[in-house]
Image: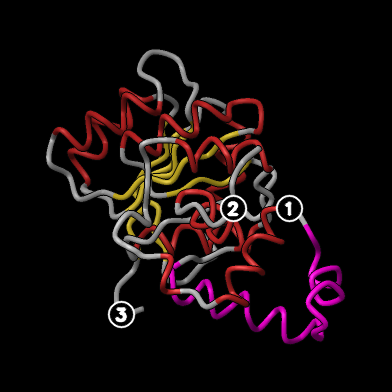
Amino acid sequence: MDSKIKLIIADDHNMFRRGLSSVLEQVKDIVILASVANGKALVQAAKELKPDVVITDIEMPGIDGITAIQEMKAAGLATRSLILSTYNSNQLIVDAMEAGALGYITKNSDDEEIVDAVRCVYGYQHYYCKTTNLNLIKRIAKSEFNPYKRLSIDLLNDREKMVSILFCQQKTAEEMAKILFLSKRTVEGIKEKIKKKIGAKSDTGIAIFAIQNGIYIIE
């Protein structure tokens, strides 16, 4: 990247915030402008420093992460928001994305995924944590948040639709290969083609697209 990604971190756990800062400070194309402990401080820092991306927890004292995202959006900031959360707050993650967040990661995400997520939302693309559980996928797919609303299921051919369905059924690449009489490598290639067509950065995007567009019907 030609310029560095200007970033603010917001989390009320000081030790975690320091650890995350330590990881991101080592990345050449990221610069941390500030690290804050609550939503009010996040909004104030964002208005003053104009970051490209903020990583924010949802549940924080005072103003929570969702309200902070809404206030930054209302202030006309071009800042992209990345949610930092845990699996016990699925509905809150959906609420945050409906409020304007472009993606989310969990607190147990590895360093590489955190960096990938930051770069992704910096480019105005949606990011879903690699270890997203099926319940959260369903909640996102049924919510008002719809990153694929301008796309058509006609983008996918029959084989790609079948792979999407099998992915929603939580089949592994090996299982898909046996069902479709294909090699595992071919299945992986089809998944990559699907992601490229719909603009998804992770396999989770395939499931959300399939559910939102009626390719896979939730029972």
Which secondary structure lies at badge 2? Answer: loop
Q: Is 16 in the magenta?
A: no
> What is the C-alpha distance between the residues marked 3 and 1?
41 Å
Residue 38 x %, y %: 41, 24
Residue drawn at (87%, 75%) of the image:
178
In screen coordinates, is 141 left or right of 48? right
Three-letter residue code for mark 1: Gln
The residue pinned by badge 2 equals 216
Q: Say whether residue 172 is magenta.
A: yes
Question: Where in the figure is residue 101, as x and y percent of width and height?
Answer: 37, 42
Instruction: Tell me if label 2 and label 1 are in contact, CB under 8 Å.
Output: yes
Residue at 58% x, 39% y: name it: 138
**Chief SS of the magenta region:** helix
Q: Secondary structure at mark 1?
A: loop
Tell me the residue that label 3 is attached to.
2
Q: Which residue is mark 1?
A: 169
Distance in Å between CA atoms under marks 2 and 1: 9 Å
Q: How is the image coloured?
A: secondary structure
Residue contact between numbered discs 3 and 1, judged by CB atoms under 8 Å: no
